[in-house]
Amino acid sequence: MMNRRRRWLLAAIVLCVALLAVSVIALAEGEEAPTTPFYKTFWSLLPAVIAIVLALITKEVYTSLFVGIIVGGLLYANFNPVNTLNHVFNDGIVASLSDSYNVGILVFLVILGIIVAMMNKAGGSAAFGRWAASRIKSRSGAQIATIALGSLIFIDDYFNCLTVGSVMRPVSDKSRISRAKLAYLIDATAAPICIIAPVSSWAAAVSSYVEDGNGLSLFIKAIPFNFYAILTIVMMIFLALTNMDYGPMAKHEKNAKDKGDVLSGMKDLAAEANETANPKGKVLDLVLPIIILIVCCIVGMIYSGGFFEGKNFVEAFSDSDASVGLMLGSAVTLVITFIYYLIRRVLSFKEIAGCIPEGFKAMVPAILILTFAWSLKAMTDSLGAKLFVEELVKGSASGLQYFLPAIIFLIACGLSFATGTSWGTFGILIPITLSVFPLTDPLGVVCVSACMAGAVCGDHCSPISDTTIMASAGAQCDHITHVSTQLPYALTAAGVSFVAYIIAGFIPNALIALPIAIGLMIGTMFLIRLIKKPQK
């Protein structure tokens, strides 16, 4: 597998070098761009198809997206190397990074990374863990507290995994909850929570793929149809309250409850990590910055939507610019947190300054994915892919469209599982979905939500997912153990979600489809409970 990946990477590098070499020669000859014959044809989909296939084969989303971008440039320029290079970088990458909305999203991600680094170094997470351990006495209480904290930290999944893990690990160990179960609770309250929170880095990323500033409005409309995220939360609460487990997880939980063995034979990674918390940290050092960030981002978003110019709250929030709101809100939060930690003397000026590059580096993978996804979208747009897909679908049998949400959900699951990234899946599938349905079409909202739900589901199951890896790290659980114990739970929620999307395809009404989906989820859990005797 490694040799195959290296061959694909080498091929991509050779392609780029050859293209650059030929471009230098062609620049001297002053060649111009002809009109492309690939516009609004099947070939307009080739860049996205290549990106998907390469991602499935190599498991390398960055290289796959970039090769897709190069192919899009070649088709647009009729394989003219000069014009290809110009289109890829000037009209693609540079144009994407020059767009004010996209820049705002990137600034928000960087600032968020800095705030997270500051909070961890201040010791607020460790302090909250000590506080919670002294107050939570039961296993169910510890699991509900983990879910509640994960739901509270909805700004970013990276932030969620690392914070919830470090805070709740001492609590779960004391309550005899296995590390495998803790890793599942962390993972299931990371991406699933972020993908249904309007004020989050995920909402900003999804919104960036929608034109005319309607991204946030579409995201909010899609929340009730995000069945996988909602049903995962319902499932977690059911498991915590009923003290039920099944699959490989049952063995780990039985060892933890009966023997106090939360590791079930695994190495104690927490001991190996030799973590040292800031002794000056207090609970307020974690809670206050989170509250300030949430409040400031909400204020920033309604400000961008015209709230202070006379619009009501709901209208202003719907019309808000997520890029501007999140950027301004996070910037204000950074300044306030900076001053607060200095006043508290929990961090020195030098330590705070050191968090700036540390936070930036933590967000580099997300920035790369977004940049390449935006650029790939620019390539397919320039080839008229949206128009081609729209005509193709409208000319097909009209009855098939009702099954599209379920089909899109499965495609997104497979792509996200293979690549280990939700954001890369968003970048490939959401623009294609929006090219088929207008924003005003209820079925289009369901399909976009299916994209998001499937991407989160695949990411949740994938062993190469950043979120899955960080959930293992946050719980200090063996990674393969986490993946194997979590998979049956994730597949259960995915199966019910698939059925729910079939129903929503015919009844695209959230007031009807969502209660049916929740009922199916609870009924499925009771059925599993009847089949398998719950652990005592």
Image: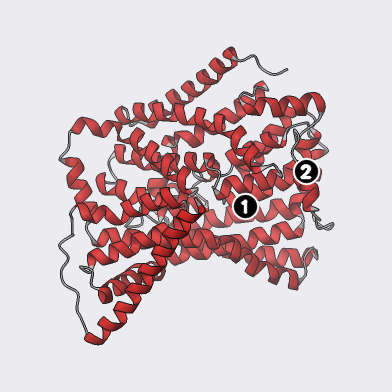
Of residues 432 and 200, the one nearer the viewer is 432
Q: Position of residue 297 (x, y in %)?
A: 54, 56
Report the residue marked by disc 2. Answer: 268
**How many badges with numbers are in the image?**
2
Q: Position of residue 203 (x, y in %)?
A: 47, 50
Question: Residue 241, located in which quarter of the rendered image?
Answer: top right
Residue at 67 percent across and 60 percent down: it is 117
Name the element at disc 1: helix
Residue at 32 percent across and 28 percent down: it is 507
Task: Identify the amino acid type marked 2.
Answer: Asp
Task: Identify the amino acid type marked 1.
Answer: Phe
188 horizontally vs 28: left or right: right
The reply to whether discs 1 and 2 touch (Cβ–Cβ < 8 Å) is no
Instruction: Point out the frontmost of discs 1 and 2.
Output: 2
Give the residue furthest to the front. Answer: 3
Residue 36 visible here: yes
Q: State whether residue 140 is above or below residue 97.
A: above
505 horizontally vs 170: left or right: left
364 horizontally vs 495: left or right: right
Residue 308 visible here: no
Residue at 45 percent across and 43 percent down: it is 455
Label 1, label 2: how many angstroms apart (C-alpha)?
23 Å
Residue at 41 percent across and 46 percent down: it is 219
Report the residue marked by disc 1. Answer: 159
